[in-house]
Amino acid sequence: MRFLTRKFGKFLKNRDGVTAVEAALCFPIILMLVFAIFQYAIFFNGATEMNKKFRDASRQVKLMNSPSTSELETLFAAQIDPDDQDRVTLNVSRVDRYGESFASVDMTYTYAIEIPMLNPFELTSSYQNLVLLSEDL
């Protein structure tokens, strides 16, 4: 034991390169955090844009005179960008509540965050709205 202490003692006291080793260990974690922040910002931006488009389409429904469910689906589907077709799920249906006719619009925006060295993580944003129709469908 004494032999090992004498032989390797100077290596145990030597602190050269410790900073490089610490940086090599911390860099992948910091890199994953940076990628996660950018990916979440992309998701948040896309979800916010979709919500704005569907709010605007909901306002347009109020100007329509006696729209059918297929016309409503066409109007809301036109708001979806071709790039987002696979990320958006849309459901438009007629609902009778409170003695009035409404169009129930349910939209789900799904985005998979891909962070290096980790499995993809899926985020989901939902938009639900009841739009009062001027007349029955």
Image (cartoon, helix red, strand yellow):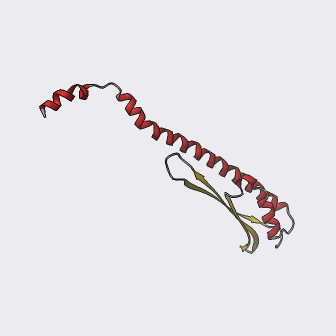
Seen in the picture, residue 92 relative to 9 is either above or below; the reply is below
Q: In which quarter of the image is the C terminus?
A: bottom right
Q: Please name whichever residue, 115 or 135, is drawn nearer the observer in this view of the structure.
A: 115
**2 shown above or below 64:** above
* Residue 52 drawn at (x, y percent): 72, 52
Residue lying farthest to the right in this orientation = 65
Q: Which of 17 and 44 is in front in this view?
A: 17
Position of 83 with respect to 114 (left or right) is: right
- Residue 57 position, x and y percent, is 78, 57
In this rendering, is residue 19 above or below 104? above
The residue lying toward the viewer, choosing from 17 and 110, is 17
Q: Quadrant of residue 12?
A: top left
> Looking at the picture, does residue 81 appear above or below residue 24?
below
Q: Which residue is drawn at 34% across and 29% down?
A: 18
Left or right, 50 with reference to 33: right
Please state if 67 lies on the left or on the right of 118 as rendered.
right
Q: Nearer the viewer, residue 42 or 63?
A: 42
Task: Give the residue displayed 38% in from the left and 33% down from the top.
Answer: 22
Name the spot of residue 89 as percent of width and height, x first.
Answer: 68, 62
Q: How many marks?
A: 0
User: Residue 54 appears in which quarter of the rendering?
Assistant: bottom right
Query: What residue is rendered at 79% in x and 58% in y?
Result: 78
Left or right: where 90 falls relative to 66: left
Which quadrant holds residue 24? top left
In the rendered view of the protein, which quadrant contains the N terminus?
Answer: top left
Residue 75 lies, in percent from the top left, at 80, 61
